[in-house]
């Protein structure tokens, strides 16, 4: 694994399971970490700051205890996703909790990493920032982040349009930190491919929704398995920011994409959880990346990680 991976000795694969709104809850995150893959979650998945604090307490206790009881196993660190958009009224509170509980790493998205970097560095944590273009990357580098997450075309959730074959080398030319590739990764061979291009780690979202442990509607998982890449629509009409959604979930909710009025980006925890939004983004309009075309089953997290390890090892041996 790459020398730029600060947690390499705790990981069984160069892989982060991406934070996903209404998907990444503590049970899934803990299970992923226990299998040597870094698990993450958006702080806003917790309805209140008190809930968020209890999740941090749980992970800070459960993961070290599991590692101590199973010294032969690699237990990966967990990371917290802070949405740094101005509509997130809980940012300051959640940021203070991250600092208090010293989360091993933080992922900042939808905005500028700002003073999160100094807070997380004060206790030795790492900050990785989501970017979709060179301009955002440059600003994040200037802010002192440890790594960049390149959210490429076809990714689940809010996604960019860059192709990784040129995005990774262009970023590597200007940045010596950790490069993490996001978007459509579904098999272990892809983790070797991204290393060949100059990145250090992969970031998988959709693949982890289609696991036994993900606490989402069974219909969501089944739709991922039955969908192909052609069934993914890239639009800003659902959440106000360009992202990828499964067409069948729009049809199921009785929504025609042409008929949707403009949406505004909204990361206010109150309204996001209350689902006052007419389009019911995330809850009923299900997001997934183009990688759905490769996803054919619903394994346990342990089974999935085992398979990814085999594929990664086989690709490296070629
Ligand atoms: C349902 C869903 C919810 C997401 N929510 C968030 C989020 O709250 N914060 C964030 O930074 N990224 C979010 N993402 C994006 C992922 O972190 C990641 O970039 C993406 O899933 C990677 O692409 P893939 O799904 O094709 O693997 C979400 C993605 C999905 C599919």
Image: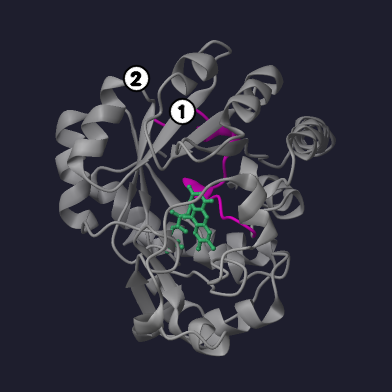
Q: Which mark, by number, is residue 210?
A: none
Residue occupying image coordinates x 58% and y 13%: 123
Q: How many marks?
A: 2
156 relative position to 72: left or right = left
| Residue denoted by label 2 | 144
Specify few, some or many for label 1: CA neighbours under 10 Å numbering under 14, 14-19, or 20 or more: many
- Magenta part of the protein: which range? 3-22
Q: Is residue 6 magenta?
A: yes
Q: Confirm or deny contact between disc 2 and disc 1 (CB under 8 A).
A: yes
| Quadrant into which the N terminus falls | top left
SS category of the residue bearing label 2: loop
- Residue 30 visible from this viewpoint: yes
| Residue denoted by label 1 | 127
Distance, label 2 to label 1, CA atoms, is 9 Å
Q: Position of residue 251 (x, y in %)?
A: 50, 89
Residue occupying image coordinates x 64% and y 21%: 96
Q: Main secondary structure of the magenta part?
A: loop
Q: Position of residue 51 (x, y in %)?
A: 79, 39
Q: Position of residue 7 (x, y in %)?
A: 53, 31
Q: Is residue 130 magenta?
A: no
Counting residues from the start of the chain, the first of labels 2 and 1 encountered is 1
> Based on the displayed image, in which of its 4 quarters is residue 46 positioned?
top right
Is residue 212 shown above or below 62?
below
- Residue 296 visible from this viewpoint: no
Q: Nearer the viewer, residue 26 or 310?
A: 26
Q: Nearer the viewer, residue 313 or 23?
A: 23
């Amino acid at each position: 694994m790459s020398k730029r991976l600060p947690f390499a000795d705790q990981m069984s694969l160069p892989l982060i399971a991406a934070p996903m709104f209404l998907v990444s809850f503590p049970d899934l995150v803990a299970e992923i970490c226990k299998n040597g893959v870094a698990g993450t979650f958006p702080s806003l998945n917790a309805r209140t700051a008190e809930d968020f604090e209890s999740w941090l307490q749980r992970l800070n206790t459960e993961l070290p205890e599991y590692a101590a009881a199973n010294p032969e196993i690699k237990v990966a660190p967990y990371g917290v996703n802070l949405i740094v958009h101005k509509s997130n009224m809980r940012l300051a509170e959640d940021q203070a909790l991250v600092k208090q509980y010293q989360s091993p790493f933080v992922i900042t998205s939808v905005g500028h990493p700002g003073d999160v970097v100094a807070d997380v560095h004060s206790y030795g944590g790492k900050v990785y920032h989501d970017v979709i273009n060179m301009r955002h990357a440059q600003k994040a580098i200037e802010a002192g982040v440890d790594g960049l997450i390149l959210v490429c075309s076809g990714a689940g959730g809010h996604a960019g349009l860059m192709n990784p074959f040129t995005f990774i080398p262009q970023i590597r030319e200007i940045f010596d930190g950790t490069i993490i590739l996001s978007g459509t990764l579904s098999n272990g061979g892809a983790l070797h491919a991204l290393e060949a291009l100059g990145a250090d780690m992969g970031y998988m979202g959709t693949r982890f929704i289609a696991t036994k442990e993900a606490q989402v509607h069974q219909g969501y998982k089944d739709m991922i398995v039955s969908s192909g890449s052609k069934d993914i629509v890239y639009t800003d009409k659902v959440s106000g920011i360009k992202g990828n959604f499964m067409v069948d979930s729009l049809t199921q909710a009785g929504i025609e994409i042409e008929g949707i009025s403009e949406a505004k980006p909204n990361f206010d925890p109150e309204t996001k959880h209350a689902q006052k939004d007419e389009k019911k983004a995330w809850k009923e309009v299900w997001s997934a990346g183009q990688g759905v075309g490769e996803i054919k089953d619903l394994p346990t997290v342990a089974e999935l990680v085992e398979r990814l390890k085999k594929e990664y090892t086989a690709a490296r041996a070629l």
